[in-house]
Amino acid sequence: MIRRTGTTSRGIRTPIIKSGDNLIDIIVESVLLASKSEGFDLHDRDVVAVTESVVARAENNYATCDHIATDVRRKFPQGEVGVIFPILSRNRFAVNLRGIARGARKIVLQLSYPTDEVGNSLMDIDQMDERGIDPLKDCLSEERYRELFGINRHTFTGVDYVEYYRDIIVKEGCDAEIILANDPLAILDYTSHTLVCDVHSRDRTKRLLRKAGAETVLGLDDLLTESIDGSGYHEQYGLLGSNKASEERVKLFPRAGKEFVDAVSNLFMLRTGKSIEVMIYGDGAFKDPVCKIWELADPVVSPAFTNGLSGKPKELKLKYLTDSQFADLVGHELEEAIRHAIADKEKDQDFEMNAGGTTPRQLTDLLGSLADLTSGSGDKGTPVVLIQGYFDSLAD
């Protein structure tokens, strides 16, 4: 029988996951129950994607503002911290900022503009141009920012993040000074003790600060890298990838890795005889076309995955083949020619040319983005996503 569908993505409902739950058993059992209930079969190379949120919750990977404050006091004993390029987010950074402020005497907060790293806006870019502000050079004080741009509320949340972050700092009994500048070295006019908070450009920011002679150069990935008084932690990412759990607690990025995904895959093999690929996923790597916000606030899309998900897809672009190489063919002859081209692509010496500009993204970035869009971040109750037919092609 000819298959009439290609890739399918299903959100799989699970029980509510709590700390200490046997997540491996829950994942496998939930997929098998859905298969039986919905009448679909599992196949070799199906992909089971598990959101990082439930993985971290099951392993009880949490920390409080007091834990963060303790680590800040240890690593910034002088009590002065230049906090550079944080994301503007109640979920992603506000609780971290509360903990940092609790452990400090003074914070100089440097925000990038016209947006933060992932696209949250602090000003209208056209107004920035009209007022003659050069984002490559100009450093704005909070007072100058207000004079030029007034109150700027987030498009979706309505939050004025300059005011919001100032209030968080001050309420912890910490002095606050806020500047807007895109040159990381601008902070050195205020303090030589720096905490780098950008996610994807953090290595460059740290390098520039060290080269310029900053006394202290640490990042969010250097806080909570070990347990503080029994807290959760992450050896590699620290506070990067953390999410708000409450006003006083954050859930850290999951520590579970290769051992976890392999254990889930092995249990699927034991229960079904099928070789199932497994990955943990966080934010998808996509940009909203309306608000211009890039979703990827996690350090990576997928912190752990089975071996079959490494690398990039090797695909031909059908519209390019149809319009160029096989432009003179139609109907059955066209379909057969394309099927043969796909079947022979591993032997194709001109593969890159015939690929026709297909973007070579990582498999886990593509699959993680699909899983994130499928599960959402709200109340769907589907922290596990089953993706089928992803590795099939028209030639199969």
Image (cartoon, rainbow, N blue to C red):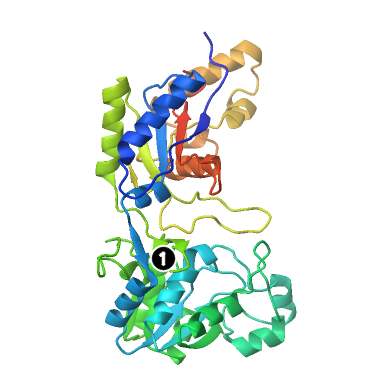
Looking at the image, which is closer to me, 130 or 342?
130
Looking at the image, which is closer to me, 376 or 180?
376
Residue that mark 1 sits on:
249
Residue 172's spot in the image, x, y percent?
46, 83
Answer with left or right where residue 72 lies relative to residue 121. left
Residue 88's spot in the image, x, y percent?
55, 69
- Residue at the image point whose x is 60% and y is 12% from the top: 333
- Residue at the image point whose x is 42% and y is 25% from the top: 33
Looking at the image, which is closer to me, 285 or 88?
88
In which image quadrant can residue 324 be found? top right
Please determine whether, in this image, residue 312 is positioned above or below residue 32.
below
- Residue at the image point whose x is 67% and y is 85% from the top: 146
- Residue at the image point whose x is 70% and y is 87% from the top: 147
| Mark 1: amino acid | Arg
- Circle 1: element type: strand
Residue 292's spot in the image, x, y percent?
63, 58
